[in-house]
Amino acid sequence: MKANCWYSKHDVRVEEVNDPKILNRRDAIVKISSTAICGSDLHLYNGYIPTMEAGDILGHEFMGEVVETGSDVKNLSTGDRVVASFPISCGNCFFCKKQLFSLCENSNPNAPIAQQLFGHSPAGIYGYSHMLGGFAGGQAQYARVPFADVGTIKIPEGLPDEKVLFLSDIFPTGYMAAENCDIEPGDTIAVWGCGPVGQFAIKSAYLLGAERVIAIDRFPERLRMASERAGAETINYEEADVYDTLMEMTGGLGPDACIDAVGMEAHTPGIIGAYDRVKQAMMLEADRPHVLRQAIMACRKGGTVSVPGVYGGFDDKIPLGAFVNKALTLKTGQTHVQRYMGPLLERIEKGDIDPSFVITHRMSLEDAPKGYNIFMNKQDECIKIVLKPN
């Protein structure tokens, strides 16, 4: 089969690789009909995630048709159309039973590697380094889905791929980020980052009852989508001071909750941005956490900072004094996708939301390297790319 493989920083190639096989009785093999390039894939592309190996198959957002199942998979049949969740979860461990699926104890065979960095290992993730399991990803014609009885949802006839593909990751991720804000009627939510996760965080905040959402970015096409398609007020951080503008827009109170949908590669102009870039390049700091700092400073007293953005290691200049003295709550985590797939599918079926609004580019799998380059460099007003492997 063909698959998009990582080789080194800014070097991905579509190559012929071996077809996946059933390795466990709870596996399924899926013929992929749609997959996508995720913003977090750019962290791999830019070389910031350790333990990648040459030839690793990328991709964790995918769906398709079941073509084979292991003997213990009783809830799927050949021909079923499914979306796969990006965290791989057993469904039976302490954390899965609490619906904390991205913290599964049994799905990462390389847990000791992750434990050295994080203290404990999260779940395995498709196509996202050997620290998180070394699983082949879904930017391919076929994929093996471990724990397929837990990690997939069947899609009814009549729903096109593009409406449901993002149940694999970015729709639940944006929704969980908004849910973590404990939104009450009348709340104002600020969202940093108007990429796909930020767009879904905006839409989800409104679904959960927010009165206002203020979106922060610098790219006109992203700010335009946030305004016209997601309904947010916007701030271009290259044209206005974010803290001062948020205070002005909220009568000096600050947003009730702040969502960092940017993560480890935050951009900011001036000396602070240069400081973070130099420290990250010299491996003196794992991430560029400018947005996290800004969210903590801007959030109203007693508010919540929600972080769906990916962070990988150790960071400095985090304003813990503000965090403590303002009595803030911090909520984070890789998304517990399996918890949200069913309820969000119902939202799609009822017409509450059509997730396909974020798609700007559609390509064949063979064009994946070109897609990564366009996406990374924000060319052609690219916000979300869907790939068609078959």
Image: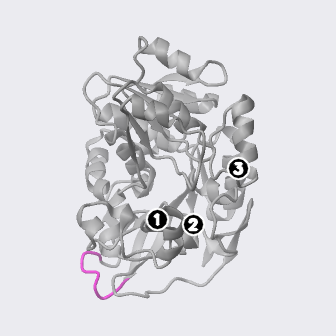
- From what the image shows, is residue 348 above or below residue 125? above
**Which mark identifies residue 280?**
3
Per the model, the C-alpha gap separating discs 3 and 1 is 22 Å
Residue 150 in percent (x, y) is at: 30, 70
Crowding around mark 2 (Cα neighbors within 10 Å: few <14, some 14 to 19, many 20+) is: many
Residue 110 in percent (x, y) is at: 50, 77
Which of the 4 image quadrants contains residue 86?
bottom left
* Residue type marked 2: Gln
Q: Magenta region: which residues?
A: 69-76
Residue 73 lies within the magenta run: yes
The reply to whether residue 135 is in sight is no
Mark 2 and mark 3 in contact? Answer it, CB < 8 Å.
no
Per the model, the C-alpha gap separating discs 2 and 3 is 28 Å
User: Of circles 1 and 2, which is in front?
Assistant: 1
Residue 319 lies within the magenta run: no
Location of mark 2 (residue): 139
Which of the 4 image quadrants contains residue 156?
bottom left
- The one of 384 and 120 positioned closer to us in this rendering: 120
* Residue type marked 3: Gln
User: Of circles 3 and 1, which is in front?
Assistant: 1
Secondary structure beneath label 1: loop
User: Of circles 2 and 3, which is in front?
Assistant: 3
- Which of disc 3 and disc 2 is earlier in sequence? 2
Location of mark 1 (residue): 119
Residue drawn at (30%, 40%), measured in percent from left and top? 351
Residue drawn at (54%, 73%), measured in percent from left and top? 113
Secondary structure beneath label 2: loop
